[in-house]
Image: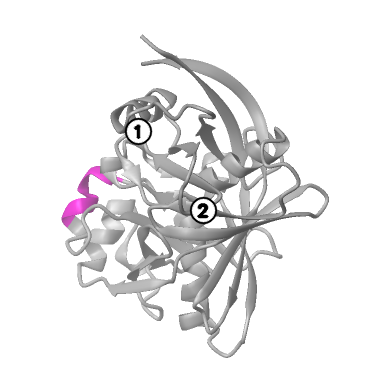
């Protein structure tokens, strides 16, 4: 039996128990892949992160859902870097690189009424969704007419694949009751993908998009409160399909209202939609031990 200390941080918020919770395990290079997955399962958050030594970058981070490892996680990156920086483990560095399974990505720290972290994401990729919009809507607990067909429903990735679904109104988000178990039947092209409905109507007049994020059933979770990688690819989507005339975009995406965990993600889009950066913050909540 081994006891492991897990630090709980909430990302994309500076208020405890808002934004997106992440577990961070510091300083244990001896854990096996299965032990990391088991820790993530015991923690129960959407992701738990394990920073470690890298021979390709300043730092390597591995990310685990309760069900499996994923390539990249925005909110757990924010939580991990906030933890390392505030604990003095990064010294005075304001820039560094992290090795992930989505590639080596640059990071910047800056102050704006608090510590903020900007992470460059992987090159945006898109792939067509050819499935049934009716079945997709029912999998989310809404009707086909709630999906906005003036915009494309398609898979997108800036490190992790998700299905981006334009929704007509905020009202539909309050009706959503995801049935994650049927997602693989609907997502025939990418059965392990998550689902990310969004709309251009927002609660916050300063926000550009509202979203929810429903997990793949293979991940062992149901919903993600504030999603960094999905917000990043939404920025690329916005640049390509909503505002393709602006040379650069600075967007605010709100998420988490429906489950009581209000979060904000800043997304900047440059280089004709190919350079995506996500900015956020985090806050320490508590620490606890899990046994494996």
Which residue of the protein is positioned furthest toward the top in this rendering? 1
Residue 106, given in percent of the width and then of the height, sits at: 57, 60
Please tell me whether mark 2 sits on a helix, a strand or a loop.
loop
Mark 1 vs mark 2, foreground winner is 2
Image height of 33 relative to 58, above or below = above
Residue 118 relative to residue 21: left or right? right
Q: Which residue corresponds to mark 2?
A: 57
Q: Are marks 1 and 2 in contact (CB under 8 Å)?
A: no
- In the rendered structure, find residue 66 and report the number of the disc placed on it: 1
Q: Quadrant of the N terminus?
A: top left
Residue 169 position, x and y percent, is 50, 65
| Residue 136 in picture, x, y percent from top left | 27, 60
Indicate whether residue 236 is drawn in magenta: no
Residue placed furthest toward the front = 55
Q: Is residue 171 visible?
A: no
Q: Nearer the viewer, residue 241 or 258?
A: 241
Report if residue 183 lies within the magenta region: yes
State the CA–CA distance, disc 1 to disc 2.
26 Å
At x 20%, y 52%, the residue is 184
Which residue lies at the image location 36% right of the left edge and 37% below the top edge?
221
Nearer to me, 53 or 115:
53
The quadrant of the rendering that contains the C terminus is: top left
* The quarter of the displayed image where residue 266 is located: bottom right
Vertical position of residue 204 compared to residue 60: above or below = below
Asked whether 83 or 278 is in front, the reply is 83
Q: Residue at x 71, y 65 (%)?
A: 206
Relative to 152, say whether 183 is above or below.
above
Q: Which residues are magenta?
A: 179-185
């Amino acid at each position: 039996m081994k006891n492991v200390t897990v630090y709980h941080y909430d990302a994309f918020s500076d208020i405890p128990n808002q934004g997106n919770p992440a577990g961070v395990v510091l300083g244990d290079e001896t854990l096996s892949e299965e032990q990391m997955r088991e820790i993530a399962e015991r923690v129960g958050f959407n992701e738990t992160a394990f920073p470690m030594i890298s021979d390709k970058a300043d730092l390597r981070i591995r990310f685990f859902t309760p069900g499996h490892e994923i390539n990249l996680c925005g909110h757990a990156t924010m939580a991990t870097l906030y933890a390392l920086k505030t604990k003095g483990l990064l010294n005075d560095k304001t820039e560094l690189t992290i090795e992930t399974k989505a590639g080596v990505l640059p990071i910047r720290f800056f102050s704006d009424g608090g510590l903020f972290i900007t992470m460059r994401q992987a090159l945006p990729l898109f792939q067509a969704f050819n499935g049934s919009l009716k079945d997709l809507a029912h999998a989310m607990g809404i009707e086909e007419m709630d999906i906005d067909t003036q915009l494309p429903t398609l898979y997108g990735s800036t490190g992790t694949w998700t299905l981006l679904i334009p929704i007509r109104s905020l009202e539909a988000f309050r009706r959503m009751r995801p049935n994650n178990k049927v997602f693989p039947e609907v997502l025939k092209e990418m059965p392990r993908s998550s689902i990310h409905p969004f709309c251009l109507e927002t609660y916050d007049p300063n926000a550009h998009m509202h979203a929810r994020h429903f997990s793949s059933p293979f991940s062992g979770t149901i919903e993600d409160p504030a999603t960094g990688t999905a917000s990043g690819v939404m920025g690329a989507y916005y640049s390509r399909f909503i505002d393709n005339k602006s040379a650069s975009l600075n967007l605010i995406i709100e998420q988490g209202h429906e489950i009581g965990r209000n979060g904000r993600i800043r997304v900047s889009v440059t280089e004709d939609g190919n350079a995506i950066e996500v900015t956020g913050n985090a806050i320490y909540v508590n620490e606890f031990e899990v046994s494996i």
